[in-house]
């Protein structure tokens, strides 16, 4: 059974180190050691910085791969047009069990990340810098780095800089979630999508990018685009940080130049010589089969061309001795639990998709396969963030990559191979922390609210069942099938919304006097998708 990865696993490098320079000397580069290794850094103007990012084809290293120069120019133009100072945000939230490359950089080279972020803040005229993290180790390291530079959050500071610590959740890493938490809200995506470059923290234009992206910018600013381009591919120069785990002898974070064969990276980590498949890009990524591994090189374009994904830089091989559908089911169940619980197609669709994959493994036949494909299609582009899209992509890739095993389960008695749990998950299959204001135990505790239907007012609009399907189901006549029901604690916010939006004002909420829990004046933030378990499933 594969244990959870440590915050800072073994770190290796292929070729000359750039981001990992100095790692062979000390465990963590404090400011004096950072300057000894990397040297001083001169500020650049806004357009100079944008041109540099464009010349090295710098793209976001958090998964989406958006061109950094476009984001930088968009923020600058918006700030000038509106006459407000922008904000710079470093996204160091790395909440996927198979990803550690940003955590390694924050823990071991925090000043390289700050170099890039401060370059951008100076060029844009920003007066606020926030670093979003989710782990205790990254919080300590980054707060120490800010203190080493004399940066703080005081009102009189020329640049107000602080660390924003959020819970370890898959949706926490979404840009909108991080911005919302910085503004004092819960670390979950809002209901509408707004470009951070136009309106981010406090409504100001916000330059938000991944921790590795800022570190890459700092390297390029020091050595120049020509020298930076001497490493890696012509159209994707530089290095890439990868986290390699799964069926490997030595889980590691590795810095490699783009263009290195993927099979060489796997060999370094001690992967099987002929893996059954390799999951590329992490749990929002795609599987590639053994034959394709030999064709792939480490680059965004190459992996896309062979049906894989660079994504967040996670690479996970599995051996020929394990059931790939069973391994994928464990991940699908975890992804379902990581829903923020506020978009129906996500918090209902992802558990349904996981159950569909489980049905296939249990001999559900062709009908189960078609049901899984239908659910995966239905959840796409229907959420407040990319979590349902990435999860659906993972499930569709699983079905596509392992056709022989799929046929054995759909048409026969299964593949006969065990599920070894080689794909790392957090302990217990879930994240160790919950949403702000309470953990999983509080979410799954006794109900504190009951919801009632006033039949003299109800007109059968059906909105209650759309908003609160955990409680309400419509009968054949179109009216709710219950007159009163306890509200699961994770769904209390949605129950309040159902009461407020009922067109006939036929719903009311009352405190459940049987509960032993003290009442609170404010309802908790929306659930993190564990409600099915609270309902006894």
Image (cartoon, rainbow, N blue to C red):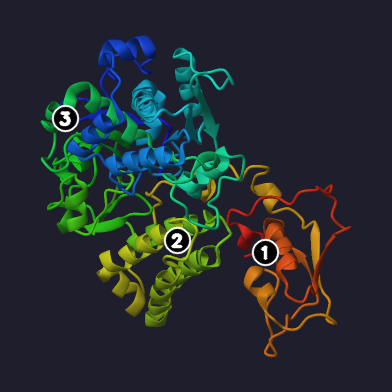
Which residue does the image show at 35% across and 77% down from the upper left?
A: 410
How far apart are the alpha carbons under marks 1 and 3? 56 Å
Are circles 3 and 2 on residues that touch, CB within 8 Å? no
Q: Nearer the viewer, residue 122 or 191?
A: 122
In this orientation, does residue 133 appear?
Answer: yes
Q: Quadrant of residue 438?
A: top right
Is 272 on the left-hand or right-hand side of 8?
Answer: left
Q: Quadrant of residue 196?
A: top left
In front: mark 2 or mark 1?
2
Q: Nearer the viewer, residue 514 or 74?
A: 74
Whichever of labels 3 and 2 marks the residue nearer the N terminus, that label is 3
Which residue does the image show at 25% across and 21% down from the upper left?
A: 21
Q: Is residue 226 above or below residue 410?
A: above
In front: mark 1 or mark 3?
3
Q: Is residue 423 above or below residue 341?
A: above
Whichever of labels 2 and 1 marks the residue nearer the N terminus, that label is 2
| Residue receiving disc 2 | 388
| Residue receiving disc 3 | 225
For label 1, count other residues whose C-alpha is less than 10 Å away and answer few (under 14), some (14-19) or many (20+). few
User: Where is residue 318 shown, x and y percent of the image?
Assistant: 29, 52
Disc sitting over residue 535 in the figure: 1
């Amino acid at each position: 059974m594969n244990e959870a990865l440590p915050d800072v696993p073994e770190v290796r490098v292929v070729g000359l180190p750039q981001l990992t320079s100095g790692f062979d000397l000390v465990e963590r580069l404090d400011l004096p050691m950072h300057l000894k290794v990397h040297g001083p850094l001169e500020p650049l103007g806004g357009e100079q910085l944008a041109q540099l990012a464009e010349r090295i084809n710098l793209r976001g290293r958090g998964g989406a791969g958006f061109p950094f120069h476009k984001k930088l120019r968009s923020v600058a133009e918006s700030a000038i047009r509106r006459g407000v100072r922008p904000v710079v945000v470093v996204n160091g939230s790395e909440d996927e069990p198979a990803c550690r490359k940003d955590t390694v950089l924050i823990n071991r080279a925090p000043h390289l990340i700050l170099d890039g972020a401060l370059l951008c803040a100076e060029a844009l005229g920003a007066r606020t810098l926030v670093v979003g993290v989710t782990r205790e180790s990254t919080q300590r390291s980054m707060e120490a780095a800010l203190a080493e530079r004399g940066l703080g959050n005081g009102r009189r500071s020329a640049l107000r800089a602080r660390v924003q610590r959020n819970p370890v959740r898959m949706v926490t890493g979404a840009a909108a979630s991080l911005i919302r938490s910085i503004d004092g809200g819960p670390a979950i995506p809002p209901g509408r999508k707004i470009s951070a470059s136009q309106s981010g923290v406090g409504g100001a234009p916000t330059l938000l990018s991944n921790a590795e992206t800022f570190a890459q910018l700092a390297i390029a600013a020091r050595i120049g685009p020509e020298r930076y381009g001497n490493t890696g591919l012509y159209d994707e120069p530089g290095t890439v940080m990868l986290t390699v785990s799964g069926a490997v002898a030595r889980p590691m974070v590795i810095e490699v130049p783009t263009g290195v064969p993927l099979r060489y990276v796997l060999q370094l980590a001690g992967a099987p010589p002929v893996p059954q498949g390799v999951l590329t890009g992490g749990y929002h990524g795609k599987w590639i089969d053994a034959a394709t591994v030999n064709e792939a090189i480490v680059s965004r374009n190459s992996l896309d061309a062979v049906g894989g994904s660079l994504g967040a830089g996670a690479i996970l091989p599995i051996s020929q001795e394990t059931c790939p559908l069973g391994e994928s089911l464990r991940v699908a169940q975890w992804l379902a639990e990581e829903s923020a619980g506020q978009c129906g197609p996500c918090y209902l669709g992802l558990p349904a998709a996981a159950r569909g994959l489980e049905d296939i493994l249990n001999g559900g036949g062709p009908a189960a396969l078609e049901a899984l494909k239908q659910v995966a299609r239905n959840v796409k582009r229907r959420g407040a963030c990319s979590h349902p899209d990435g999860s659906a992509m993972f499930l569709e890739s699983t079905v596509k990559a392992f056709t022989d095993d799929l046929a054995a389960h759909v048409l026969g008695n299964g593949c006969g191979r065990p599920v070894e749990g080689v794909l790392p998950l957090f302990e217990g299959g879930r994240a160790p922390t919950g949403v702000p204001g309470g953990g999983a135990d509080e979410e799954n505790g006794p109900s504190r609210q009951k919801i009632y239907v006033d039949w003299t007012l109800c007109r059968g609009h059906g909105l209650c069942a759309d908003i609160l399907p955990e409680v309400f189901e419509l009968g054949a006549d179109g009216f709710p099938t219950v007159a009163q029901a306890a509200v699961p604690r994770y769904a209390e916010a949605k129950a309040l919304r159902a009461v407020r939006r009922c067109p006939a004002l036929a719903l009311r909420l009352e405190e459940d006097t049987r509960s032993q829990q003290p009442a609170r004046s404010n309802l908790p933030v929306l659930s993190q998708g564990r409600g099915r378990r609270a309902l006894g499933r």
